[in-house]
Image (cartoon, helix red, strand yellow):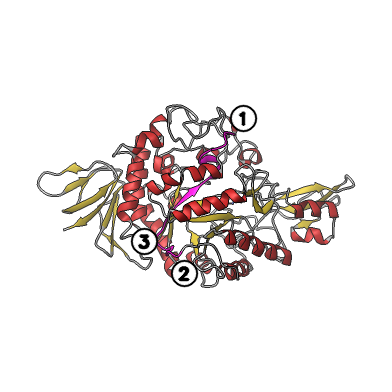
Amino acid sequence: MTASPAHSTRPWEDMVLYQIYPRSFADADGDGYGDLQGVIDHVGYLELLGVDGVWLSPIMRSPGADHGYDVSDPRDVDPLFGDVETLRRLVEELHAAQMVLIMDLVPNHTSVEHAWFAAAVEAGPGSPERERYFFRDGLGDDGSRPPNNWPSVFGGPAWTRITEADGTPGQWYLHLFAPEQPDLDWSHPDVGDDLERTLRFWLDLGVDGFRIDVAHGLAKPDDLADLPDDVEIAQLVVDERDARWDRPGVHDVHRRIRAVVDEYPGAATFGEVWVGPADRFARYLRPDELHFAFHFPLTGAPFEAGAVREAIEATLEASRIADSAPTWALSNHDVVREVTRYGNGALGTARARAMLLVELALPGITFIYEGSELGLPSDFSIPHDRLTDPTWERSGHAEMGRDHCRVPMPWEGTQPPYGFSTADRTWLPMPGDWGPLTVEAQLEDADSTLSLYRAAIETGRSWRGPRTASVEWYGAPSGCLAFRRDNGVVCALNTSERSVPLPEGEVILASGPLDPHTGAGEILPPDTAVWMRPR
Ligand code: NOJ
C-alpha cells in the first residue's frame, strides 16, 4: 500500500463541490483555452465562494474529440492544460486551502489515439490486440452492415468500420459515444489491470477521489444482440432491455475500483450513473462498490413545485435504499444551464436562484457547475462554424450539442474575453452582453447571484448534513413546496403565479425580495425561495 500525500480526512457527506470544466475556467497561458495554472490562479476565488472542493473534468492526455473524454494516455496531463507537476501543485494549493480535488476518470472507452487502439488496428482481425476492444465482422455478404443495431449516444450507429492495413474495408468496432471513443472490453484482463495503475498513479499524487464517467456502461452483453425495435432509448436508462447499459458485470468493475481506492483512506468515488429505477441505481452503492453516485432528476425537472418535489423524493429514495448520501446538481457540462431551462433572462435567473436555495437546503453533497454562481445562461447563439461538440456533426447538424453550456467564464471587464484569456479568440466565442455577469461586476453587489451563492453556502454550512438527516414535507399551497430540516430550518419555494403568505418567523435567506405583509409575517412572491425559522 502506498502512503498518500494528504487525502481528505473530512467527511464527504455534506460537501459543496464545484465542477470545473478546465478548458473554460481560466486561461493562464493565453492560448484561448483554460488550463491548470488558470485554476491555481483562482483558488482564492474558490475559497471566497466557500466550496469544499473541486471536481475537475478530464485533464488527461487527449486529442480532444470529446474534450478530454477521449483519453490517449490516462497517466499523463494533456499539454493543453499543463503537466503532471502543474496538477500536483494544484492539489497542494487546494489542500492548503482545505479543499479536495476529484478527477474525472474515463474507464469505458479510450481515444482512437491510445496506443492500444493503434496496435489493434494494425494487428488485424483475430489478433489479441483487438480483444481489448469490441472488433466484430460486419453483417451481409460483404460485411458492410454494422454488427448490431445499437445507436451511439451522439447520433448514428455505435459502430465504425475500419480500413485494414492492406487497404481493404475491414472489421467494425463499437463506440457508444463518438467514433473517436472506442469502447473497451472489460472482460479483458489488461483493461482492469491498467485502470488499477491509473487509479494508483493519481491517488499517489494526492487526488482525493474520482468522478467515474459512464459508470453504468462498463459491461456489455456477450452476445451483443440487437436491441428490440421498441426499446425506449433514453439518457436516463429506464428500459432494462437497453442492453448497452446497466449490465450485471458492471458491478464487478466497481468492486475492483473500490478495492484499490480503499487502500487510500479518505478517498472516494462518484459514479455517473444514468439509471432510473431506484433499486437498480442503489446497486451501484453497495458497500464494496461506489461511495457516491450522481443522481440527475433535478437537472431535468421543470420549475414546477410538484415536479421539483418528485425529483427530490426520487433522489432521497435512491439514497435511502442505498444508505448513501444523496447528491444534487442543477446542471453540469452536459445539460442546458438552469437559468435557460427555467426561462432565461430575469425570470430564469430568479428561478435558478430559488432552486439554489432548495438544493442547498437538502441533506447531502451538492455539485455546482462553474458559472452557475454567476447566473450564466446557455449560449445558443454560437455561430455554427464555431461549434465543437461531436453531437453537431454526428446528428447531421440536427442537434447543436453541448457547447452552449461550456462557454468560458467571464471574470472581469465589459467585453469578451472578460479576463478569461489574453487571447482575442477563445476556444468558444463569448457573448457580447455578459459584462454584468462577470465576477468583478457581481462581487461587491449584495444582490448579485454570486453573493447569494456565497451567503447560501456559508449560511447552510452548519446544518446541511448529516446524510441521515430527514426532510419533512409540509402541506403547501398549490404551486409551492416546503420542507423542514431536523434543526428546524424550513425551505419554501413558490413556483406559482401568485404570492403566498409565509408563516411568522425569522427569515434566514431569501432568493429575491420578499413583500412585507401588513400585520403578520411576510409574503413569498412567485419564482422565489426562502430559508426561515418559523416561530
Ligand atoms: C459523460 C460525460 O459527462 C460526457 O461529457 C461525455 O461526452 C460522455 N460521458 C462520454 O465520455
**Percent position of residue 89, x then y:** 54, 51
Indicate which disc, 3 or 2, sits on the residue closer to the N terminus: 2
Count the marks: 3
Instruction: Give the residue at mark 3.
Output: 363
**Percent position of residue 381, x then y:** 51, 31
Magenta extent: 9-32
Tell me whether the residue at label 3 lies in contact with that at label 1, contact meaning CB atoms closer than 8 angstroms.
no
- The residue mark sitting in front, 3 or 2, is 3
Q: Residue 385 got which mark?
A: 1
The majority secondary structure of the magenta stretch comes to loop
**Mark 2 → mark 1, Cα distance in angstroms:** 45 Å
**Mark 3 → mark 2, Cα distance in angstroms:** 15 Å
Badge 2: how crowded within 10 Å, few (<14), some, or many (20+)?
A: many
Residue 12: say if magenta: yes
Instruction: Give the residue at mark 2.
Output: 322
Q: In this rendered view, identify the residue nearer to me: 99 or 142.
A: 99
- The residue mark sitting in front, 3 or 1, is 3
**Mark 3 → mark 1, Cα distance in angstroms:** 43 Å
Relative to residue 31, is residue 183 depicted above or below? below
The residue shown at (78%, 48%) is: 161
Quadrant of the snapshot with the C terminus: bottom left
Give, as a three-letter code, the residue at label 2.
Ala
Assign a secondary structure to mark 3.
loop
Give, as a three-letter code, the residue at label 3.
Pro
Residue that sits furthest to the right in the current view: 166
The residue shown at (43%, 31%) is: 434
Residue 54 showing in the rendered view = no
